[in-house]
Amino acid sequence: MRRTAAAIAIAPLALLAACGNNAGPPPGATVTATVSVTPSTSGSGAPVTPAATPAATPSEAPVTPSRSHTAATPDQPPPTRGEPVQVKRSPASPPLVTGVRFAGHEGYDRAVIDLRGAPTGYRVRWVAQLLQDGSGDPVPVKGGAYLQVSLSPAGAHTEDGKPTWERILRAGLPNLQSVVRTGDFEGAVTIGLVLRHRAAFRVDEQAAPYRLVIDVAH
């Protein structure tokens, strides 16, 4: 009887050991893997390897664009040319200008126009003075030179008609004095860069999110 009882006691242990050696899930079990992917912002085009980490709860709070600095990017050489720039596009839905940021860099000042939506058409050129769209009245901001940025189609107000950013932003940089919204009229947005003097400039587009970047030399 003792030998039989010992055999009966050993049998469940052997069964448990066999289950412990099986690394896979039990039959019929569902395995859920959470993968968090961080998009690359380097612009190099290299593939991004997903990291198998728990996904964070996405934030639904709206992002308020800052107007005092630009995104952290390496300094580029100052611009050396200043010809007018024009790009024509017809997106299905006009993007929304959510704000304008600016910062000083080595040898140039940068203004960044943040947009929400598809890339749109734009024109950047020198003008003798800044005029308010619609009325044609002079904008009461004085400077030594004026670089006008026109975006079309585009809007700069919410559905209930409130502007998405202040009309006049004081920059106080070596060349860029102020940024002025001179128009949000008939599907077009016009922005004036008030400068101390004329200088070379360049225009660039950046994605994720979409934004228009204007650099003006000191």
Image (cartoon, rainbow, N blue to C red):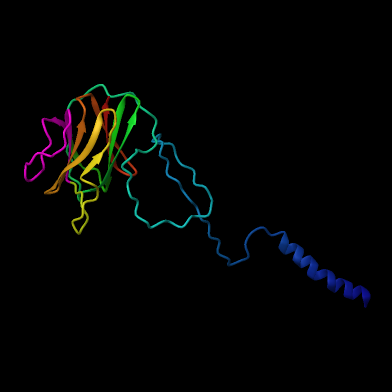
Can residue 85 be seen in this snapshot? no
Using residue 19 as the reference point, say whether residue 154 is left or right of it: left
- Overall secondary structure of the magenta stretch? loop
Residue at the extreme bottom of the image, as rendered: 1
Q: Is residue 65 left or right of residue 21?
A: left
Q: Residue at x 12, y 36 (%)?
A: 130
Magenta-drawn stretch contains 203: no
Q: Quadrant of residue 151?
A: top left
Q: Is residue 52 above or below residue 194?
A: below
Q: Quadrant of residue 42?
A: top left
Q: Nearer the viewer, residue 167 or 41?
A: 167
- Does residue 175 appear in the picture of this structure? yes
What quarter of the picture does the N terminus occupy? bottom right
Which residue corresponds to the image point at 20% horizontal and 59% vertical from the top-left? 160
Q: How many marks?
A: 0
Q: Residue 155, image x and y in percent? A: 19, 49
> Is the residue 109 above or below the residue 23 in the image?
above
Give x and y (percent) for residue 24: 64, 59
Give the quadrant of residue 18. bottom right
Percent from the top left, x then y, of residue 48?
46, 42
Q: Is residue 140 magenta?
A: yes
Name the residue at the top extreme: 80
Q: Is residue 42 left or right of residue 147?
A: right
The quadrant of the picture occupied by the C terminus is top left
| Residue at 50 percent of width and 52 percent of height | 35
Spot the residue most to the right.
2
Point 37% across, 56% down: residue:
61
Residue 58 versus residue 69: which sits nearer the camera? 69
| Residue bounds of the magenta highlight | 124-153
